[in-house]
Amino acid sequence: MSVHAMVDFPFYVPACLLLYGAWLGVLERRLGGPEALPNRGSMPWRRPLRAAALAIAAVILLRPLAAEVAAAWGLRKSAAGEAQSAAIWLGAAQRLDAAEWRYHWYAGQFWDAQAAQSGNREAARLAAGAYAAGFAANSLEVRNLLGQISVHRRHRNLLDSPADPRTLQAWLAQAAALAPLNPAVRREIAR
């Protein structure tokens, strides 16, 4: 990693930084010798501190992993035609990592397809809500904004309060400003 850091900066990846720090700690412990190690009997707070650090690390590291697994399983269930199971798993991914726009986009696509297939008002509402949450999570990613525009355009008879034409035009202008060369944005503008 040190050699790699001479050319590039690998430490923006949390795993690289964590491993590098761990190896530096191991190296310090090895080079410091046994006299550099503190007496374990003089530190009664060591066990609770280690347990707290492990719990915090588990929450921080396992939550995104659990969200990714839930989303993958939900997409697999959706492809298999198991709508109820897919809805549960995609919703779990959204709740586990609400700051990740992709999980809202996956759920929005699922609910959009359900609304198109069945004409279900609740599915259209959930699709619009998922796309809006995804765009709120990352306002620089245009896919959720395009999904929101599409849902309000295609399912306006299913939504309780569909966006008016002025709002749709404002969303389209925002999408064009975010990604003017994106083919999906150009198709939506053409529609």
Image (cartoon, helix red, strand yellow):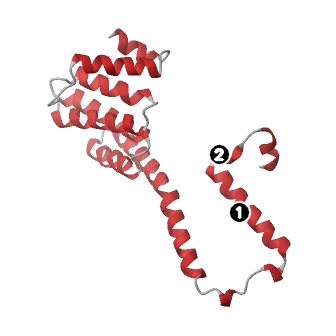
**Mark carried by residue 172:** none
Q: Nearer the viewer, residue 80 or 177?
A: 177
| Mark 1 neighbour density, 10 Å: few (under 14) some (14–19) many (20 or more) | few
Does 137 appear above or below 189? below
Q: Residue at x 26, y 21 (%)?
A: 167
Image quadrant holding the C terminus, namely top left
Q: What SS does tag 2 mark?
A: helix
Position of 183 with respect to 19 (left or right) is left
For residue 78, what is the image quadrant? top left
Q: Nearer the viewer, residue 73 or 40?
A: 40
Which residue corresponds to mark 1?
Answer: 22
- The mark total stands at 2
Does 153 appear above or below 81? above
Kindly report which numbered mark, 1 or 2, lies closer to the viewer in this rendering.
Answer: 2
Residue 6 % position (x, y): 81, 42
Amino acid carrying label 2: it is Tyr
Q: What SS does tag 1 mark?
A: helix
| Mark 2 neighbour density, 10 Å: few (under 14) some (14–19) many (20 or more) | few
Residue 88 % position (x, y): 30, 49
Residue 118 % position (x, y): 19, 30
Q: Nearer the viewer, residue 189 or 155?
A: 189
Sequence-wise first label, 1 or 2: 2
Which residue corresponds to mark 2?
Answer: 12
Residue 53 % position (x, y): 55, 69
The outermost residue toward the bottom is 41
Q: Residue at x 42, y 45 (%)?
A: 99
For residue 27, what is the image quadrant? bottom right
Amino acid carrying label 1: it is Ala
- The Cα atoms of the two marked residues, 1 and 2, are separated by 16 Å
